[in-house]
Image (cartoon, rainbow, N blue to C red):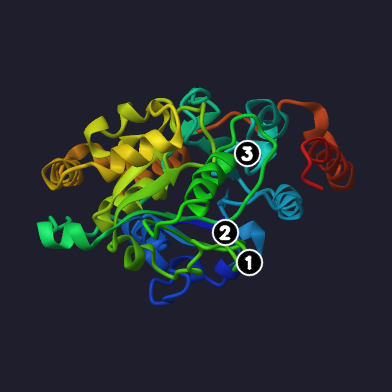
Amino acid sequence: MMKIGIVPFYDGLLNNKLFDITDCNLNADNLITPYFEIKEKLKDTYDINTIDKYSDLQDVDCVLFFYLDYKLLLRCIKNGVKKLVYFAWEPEVVDERHSKKNLKKIESFFDAIMTWNDDIVDNIKYFKINYPYFFDKLISVCTIEEFNKKKLLVNISGNKFSSHKSELYSERLKVIRFYEQGCGDTFELYGRGWSKGMRTFKGECLRKSDVYRNFKFALCLENMCNVNGYITEKIFDCFISGVVPVYWGANNVLNYIPKECYIDYPKFNNICELDNFLSSMTYQDYVKYIDNINRYLQSSKKDLFTSSFFCESMAIVLQKEFCKRGKANIWKLNYYRIYYVIKGILKKVDVV
């Protein structure tokens, strides 16, 4: 059986906590349930654990880097791990290593790079994945009485900043400031890093669904626009909570999700126009969005974001025979020379 070690997103997911669906804090909104499903679905073929569960890297057949730990990468090279795969999860707005230019600088250290970015997938070095999601239910249609009791709009996100030209953090701020300056209570803000003195701020929330059910619409802006294939859990959290997303993110979202399932944020000239559109929507028109979302959740289109599709994508890479990593001469150097070569390259992409 092939032994696979995963370098998780952060240290709190070591000791196989990446698969611990009983931990209510780690698995809020079923965030890690897809990884539990992946481990279960592949258990007859692959022994999958977080990397710390292996005392000797020479016993590991493949290491999946969900996070780029360059010191561990060096150890893998030293111990002759047969296959190294990097997952470029975050967009370059969040992680500069994931720009096309910077990925080229580190690609020779890996057999394959898994990415959602449709523009760079070539099925030679770069392979397609989507963020896996746990679709556990359909949603019920609210009554007209429930509709009338719901508040208008909510935003759940951390307070973040980026200087990247395609970031959407500043667009979230524009919406928040619009409602901060208003006099009504139709908008609420949740998440980490916001000032407690903000009028619309209501604190953090453990489960988005507990908040979303009280609103008609949710601001659903990805971290980045002007990219293809970047569709995260944000829009699906809205779907399964029965709230209609006001979406902006992937340019080619229509290749994955029908336009009738969400409100297209960029089509509005300003936030006042958006607010008027949301405020004036009738119950009958709102229900059409919910019905369309349910149709999507029952369709095969959503399967691209399931753990099953993720397993299929990962199996292709795990079973594929690759040429020797990095044709560059650095692989002929001893361990300490490799250390300084890798460290030098990673410095150029602001890793160390």
Q: CA distance from mark 3 to mark 2?
A: 20 Å
Q: Nearer the viewer, mark 3 or mark 2?
A: 3
Q: What residue is shown with label 3? A: 93
* Quarter of the N terminus within the rendering: bottom left
Residue 126 higher or lower than 10, as above or below: above
Within 10 angstroms of label 2, few (less than 14), some, or many (20 or more) residues? many
Q: Is label 1 or label 3 in front? A: 3
**Residue 170 drawn at (x, y percent):** 59, 41
Mark 2 or mark 3, which is nearer the start of the sequence? 2
Q: Earlier in the sequence, mark 1 or mark 3?
A: 1
| Quarter where residue 273 is shown | top left
Q: Are marks 3 and 2 in contact (CB under 8 Å)?
A: no
Q: CA distance from mark 1 to mark 2?
A: 7 Å
Q: Residues within 10 Å of mark 3 (few under 14, many from 20)?
A: many
In the displayed structure, would residue 171 be above or below residue 125? below
Residue at the spot x=46%, y=42% of the render? Answer: 221
**Residue 37 percent across, percent down from the top left:** 34, 60
- Tell me the amino acid under the disc marked 2: Pro
Q: Which residue is mark 2?
A: 8
Mark 1, residue position: 11
* Contact (Cβ within 8 Å) of mark 1 with mark 2: yes
Q: Position of residue 39 (x, y in %)?
A: 39, 60
Viewer-proximal residue, 187 or 109?
Answer: 187
- Residue 317 or 82: which is nearer the viewer? 317
